[in-house]
Image (spheres, helix red, strand yellow):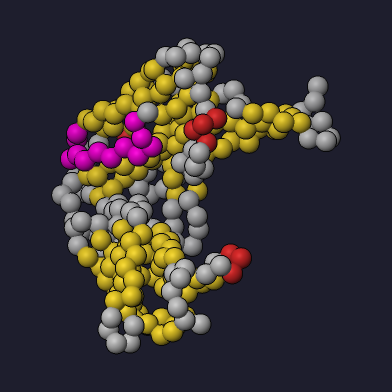
Amino acid sequence: MKPSIFFVLFCLLITGLESFASVTVENGLTHVFRGNWGDELTGTIKLTNSGKKAERVLIFKNDLVQGCANANMFAEANSQPNSSARWIKLNLNERTIAAGESYEVVYSISIPKDTSFNGSYWSLIMVEVVDPIKEEKTSSGVTIGSKIRYAIQVITDVGPYKVSPLSYEEVKLEKQEGGRGKTVQVLLKNNGIFAVNPALVFELFNKNGDKIKKIEVPFRKIYPGSCKLFEVDLTGIPKGSYDCVLVADYGQDLFGMNASLDID
């Protein structure tokens, strides 16, 4: 029997993959809850099989590990300090969804009664479609398959909300691939205990104080103690010396900085 190798494709990281999938998540890949110690919360994941055959799915828990030096990593449940995996209970671990059927996976979140902690806690509920969406044979006869796996981020904010301060860990000018232009790369760090979703506003001024450009970079989620990279596209900005203002805004407070920029 010839061996098979299956590569898992993660839907939260790869855009456009839904067009290949018969089973899709209908109610989003991020679920946010707010509660207090001892609360019991309930959520659902709505799955729809739009294909022509029944599909078996597996449901299980993982952790999402973020940092400032490394990219996002999937890890075993309860492997990071702010994991909520032990709080989450699933109503099932697998199910076969008939063609044309919609089904809701129900999960509960039991926040411990211990009042000594507070902030954002998170984990992933994984939904994996067992059958591969595509199989190809290599020249050596090995079958390579690709599966769909959805990662639903479940975030639970516990206790009184506190503003999470943001800091600018790094701001640098970089060339785009292929030399088409330049970008300002801004590394923002969340120094608080609650997850935030800041947008970055970048304003560029010439030496006379005239505003040349205003660019808004969409919201990106930053977990406590973690960083996210924001990229500002400077395509079309003439060479010269500029002053710039950066403002990170997530609706609770504004965190800004001034910088000088030389484009050559």
Nearer to us in this view, 86 or 6: 6
Q: Please, which residue is most extreme toward the right here?
A: 140
Which picture quadrant has residue 166? bottom left
Work out whether 250 lies above or below 94.
below
Whole-percent x and y of residue 124?
A: 41, 38
Q: Is residue 126 visible?
A: yes
Q: Residue at x 19, y 58 (%)?
A: 252
Residue 206 lies, with reference to residue 127, above or below; the image says: below
Q: Position of residue 156 (x, y in %)?
A: 28, 41
Name the spot of residue 75 as percent of width and height, x first: 49, 43
Q: Residue furthest left?
A: 160
Quadrant that contains the N terminus: top right
Asked whether residue 166 appears in the rendered view, the answer is no
Indicate the quadrant where residue 26 lies.
Answer: top left
The one nearer the camera, 106 or 144, is 144
What residue sits 58% from the left and 36% below the top?
8
Q: Position of residue 25 (x, y in %)?
A: 41, 29
Is 239 in the magenta?
no
- Which one is in front, 124 or 196? 196
Report the magenta residues as a range.
27-39
Vertically, is 247 above or below 132?
below
For image coordinates 34% across by 71% down, the residue present is 213
